[in-house]
Amino acid sequence: MYQKSIVADFKAGIVVFLVALPLCLGIAMACGVTLFSGIIAGVIGGIIVTLFSGSKFSVTGPAAGLTAIVITSVSQLGSYQAFIAAVVFAGILQILLGLLKAGGIGNFVPNAVIKAMLAGIGIILIFKQIPHFFGYDKDAEGDFGFEQADGHNTFSELIYMFDGITPGALIIGVISFIILKLSEKDFYKNNKVLSNLPAPLLVVAVGIGLTLVFNSIPYLVIESQHLVSLPTIKSAGDLKSNLVFPDFTAITSTQFWTVVVTIGIVASLETLLNIEATEKLDPEKNEANSNRELIAQGVGNIASGLVGGLPVTSVIVRSAANINAGAKTKLSTILHAVLLLLSVLLIPNILMLIPNACLAAILIVTGYKLAKVSIFKEQYKHGIEQFVPFVITIIVMLSTDLLKGVGAGIIVAIVFIIRDNIISLFDMSEDKLHDKRHYMIKLPQHVTFFNKGFLINYFDKIKPDSVVIIDGSINKKINRDAKDVIEEFIEKSKHINVEVQLIKINLN
C-alpha cells in the first residue's frame, strides 16, 4: 500500500511539475522580472509551504492573480529589490493574521461562488492556452489577466492568433491533445506499461521528439519563441547572479507599507479561496486549518522574498492537476518543486526543446476538468439562487480577475439571501370570519429597513372593511423605518374602515 502511494505521488509530482514549469516562468515574464524569480517561488512554495501546511493536495507557487500588483508595486518602489523586501514583511503580516485567527473569512464564501471560481479558472485557462496551442505566443504564458501585455485581451487574442499560426506547433498541439484524451480510455489505464507512464510526460516526450524532427522540415520548423524559455545556469556563479536580495532602505516610506498590506491581504484572500476550492475537488474531502495555512503562506513569502522569489499563494490550477493526477500525500507537491529546481540546474537544454503547444494541450485538458458542462447543469438544477451568483462570478472573472469575480458573486448571493429573508421571515395568514376578512402577520425577532418594502406591499393589498392583526409576540426590535410604515398604515386604515389590532408591539 505504501509503495503504491509513493508511485502515485511520483506520477502526480511529474504532472504538476509539467503544469507548474510554464506557469512559473510565464508569470515571472508577465511581471517583468527575471525568470528565475518564478522558479524560486515555485520551489519554495512546493517545499517550505508544503512542510508547514496542513493541506494534503494544495500546491503553492507564484500566482497569476498577483501579476498586476507586482508590476505596479515594483514601479512604485523603484526596484525589484525593494519590492521583495515588502514581500518579506507581507509574509510576517500573514503569520500575524494566522495567529489572530483571521483564516475563517473563507467560510463566508458561498459554495456556488467557490464552484464558479473553479469553473471560471478552467474557462480562463482554456481561452488563454488556445493561442499557444496554435503556436501564437505573443502573450506570455501565465498571464491570466483580461487586458494583456501584447495589447489584446483574452477574446481578441483568439482572433489575432489566426494571423500567426505555427503549423508545426499546431500539429504537436493536436497530437498532444489526442494522447491526453486517449489516456482517459480503459485500454490505456489497463495497460501495464502505459498505466505507469503519466500521459503529460508522454506528451512532452513526443513534443520534444517532433520538435527535433521538424527542424529538418522548413515549413514545420518551430522557432525558439514557441519553445519553453529557461534561465541558463551552468555554474555556481550563474546561480548567484540569478539570485536577487531584498533592499530594506524603503522601509520608512508610506508606499512600502501600502505594498506590504496589499500583498499580505490579497495573497491571503487568494490562498483561503483556493484552499476552499481545493477541498471541493478533493475526493477524500480533507479539510485544512485556514489559520495554519496563513502561517504557512507567511513563512513561504518570507523565504521567497529573502532570495528574490515572487510572492506565493495557494494556486488552484496546480492543485487541481495534483488531485486529478491521483496524488496520495504531500510528497507529490514536494517532488514537483524538487523537479523544478533540478530541471533548471541539470537539464535546461532538454526542457528548452519543449513546445509551448504541448504544454498548452495539458493545461487545456486541466481547464476542461474544472469547467465541465455538467457543473453548469448541476448549478442550474439547484435553482436561480445558486445559478445566478455562479454565472455572475464567472463573467466578472473572465472580464477582470479572480478576486473581483468572487466579490461580485458574493454580492449577488447576498442580494438573494436578503430577498429570501425579507419574505420568509414573516408568518402570514388570511381568513374570513363573521363576514369579515381577517389578516394576520407575525413579525420576526428583528425587523429592519430591508423589510420596509415587503411591509408596504403587504399593507397595500389589505382590502377595506377588514381586520388586520399585527403580532409582535416574538419580536425584539423594530427598525424606525419599519415602525413608520406600520404607523402610516394605521393612519390609512382609519379611512378605509380597517380595524388594526397590535399584539405586544411598541411603536414609540
Image (cartoon, rainbow, N blue to C red):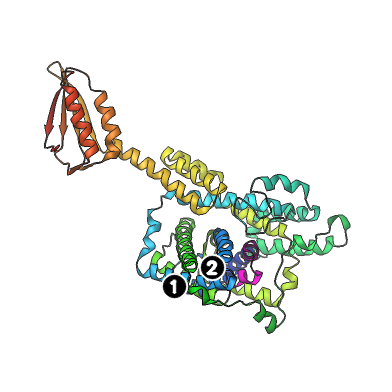
Q: Is residue 232 above or below residue 416?
A: below
Q: In what element is the residue under mark 1?
A: helix
Q: Quadrant of residue 507?
A: top left
Tell me residue 208's x, y (percent): 76, 64
Task: For residue 28, say whether it is visible.
Answer: yes
Which disc number belongs to residue 92? Answer: 1
Q: Magenta includes 30?
A: yes
User: Distance between the Cα atoms at labels 2 and 1?
Assistant: 12 Å
Q: Quadrant of residue 465?
A: top left
Q: Quadrant location of the C terminus?
A: top left
Residue plotted at (44% across, 58% down): 276
Image check: 130 left or right of 6? right
Between 417 and 286, the one lying in front of the other is 417
Image check: 122 left or right of 383? right
Which disc number belongs to residue 74? Answer: none
Q: Amino acid at mark 2?
A: Pro
| Start-end of magenta stretch | 22-40
Q: Amino acid at mark 1?
A: Ile
Q: In what element is the residue under mark 2?
A: loop
Q: Residues within 10 Å of mark 1 (few under 14, many from 20)?
A: many
Which residue in the structure is indicated by mark 2?
A: 311
Tell me residue 68's x, y (percent): 57, 59
